[in-house]
Amino acid sequence: MKILVINGPNIQLLGVRKPEIYGKGTLSDLQDSLEKIAKELKLKISFFQSNHEGEIVDVIGSAIENGIDGIIINPAAYTHTSIAIHDALESVGIPAIEVHISNIHRREEFRRKSVTASACLGQISGLGTEGYGWALRAIADHLEKIKLTGV
Ligand code: CA2
C-alpha cells in the first residue's frame, strides 16, 4: 500500500517560523517520523510539498497512475479557498485524510471553514504534527478494512 503525504503553502517553514503555533520540529523531522510509522505499518510513503495550487492539483490528479492507495493532505491556506483541490480529491476518489497542525476551529474566523474536508474521509486538527501520524494509522486501518470487506 502506498501513501502520499501532501503539504501545501509555507509548510516548508515548519520549525523555522511561528513555533508557538506549529511547533519546533522541521518538515524533515516530520517526514522522518512518518517514515518510521509507515515502516511499522508496512506501508510505502512518499512526500510532496508545494506553494502552488496547480502543482497540488496535478499531483492528486496523477495519484491513480502512480499507484497511490491513500492520501494525507494538509492543504494549508488552500484549505479555506481551493475548490480545485476539493475537486481533484473528489475526482480521484482515493481515501484522503485532511490534517491541520493547529486547531483551525480555535483560530481566526476565516480558518474555521474547510472547502477541502468534504472531499476527505475525515479531518484531524489541533494535535500538532502528531496528527499526521494518527492520520497514517487511520488510513492504514481504513485500507485494511476495504481489503477485508471489499467495501
Ligand atoms: O494548522 C495547519 O496545519 C494549517 O493548515 C496551517 C496553514 C494555515 O493557513 C491553516 O489555516 C492551518 C499555514 C501553514 C503555514 O505553515 C507555517 C509553518 C511554520 C511557520 C510558518 C508557517
Image (spheres, rainbow, N blue to C red):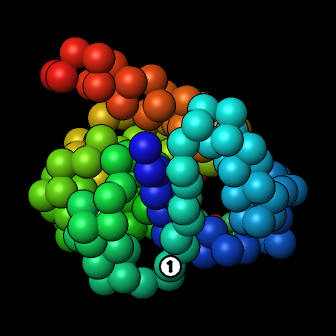
Q: Which residue is mark 1?
A: 50
Q: Where residue 3 sits in the image (x, y, percent)?
A: 46, 50
Left or right: residue 118 compared with residue 18: left
Q: Quadrant of ligand 1?
A: bottom right
Above or below, 140 relative to 151: below
Identify the image quadrant of residue 115.
bottom left
For the N terminus, the image quarter is top left
Number of residues whose C-alpha sits closer than 10 Å to that of mark 1, classed few (under 14), some (14–19) or many (20 or more): some
Q: Is residue 136 above or below residue 5?
A: above
Seen as rendered, the residue at the extreme top is: 149
Q: Quadrant of residue 118?
A: top left
Can residue 108 be seen here? The reply is: no
Residue 42 visible from this viewpoint: yes
Query: Could you tell me which quadrant the C terminus lies in?
Result: top left
User: What residue is at 58 percent from the left and 37 percent from the top?
Assistant: 42
Q: Toward the viewer: 149 or 96? A: 149
Circle 1: element type: loop
Question: Where residue 47 appears, x then y in whole percent?
Answer: 56, 65
Q: Position of residue 41 (x, y in %)?
A: 60, 32
Residue 117 at x, y = what percent?
Answer: 31, 45
In this rendering, is residue 140 above or below 100? above
Q: Is residue 141 left or right of residue 22?
A: left
In this view, the residue farthest toward the left is: 91
Q: Amino acid at mark 1?
A: Ser
Q: Residue at x 54, y 73 (%)?
A: 49
Q: Residue at x 24, y 67 (%)?
A: 65
Q: Nearer the viewer, residue 145 or 97?
A: 145
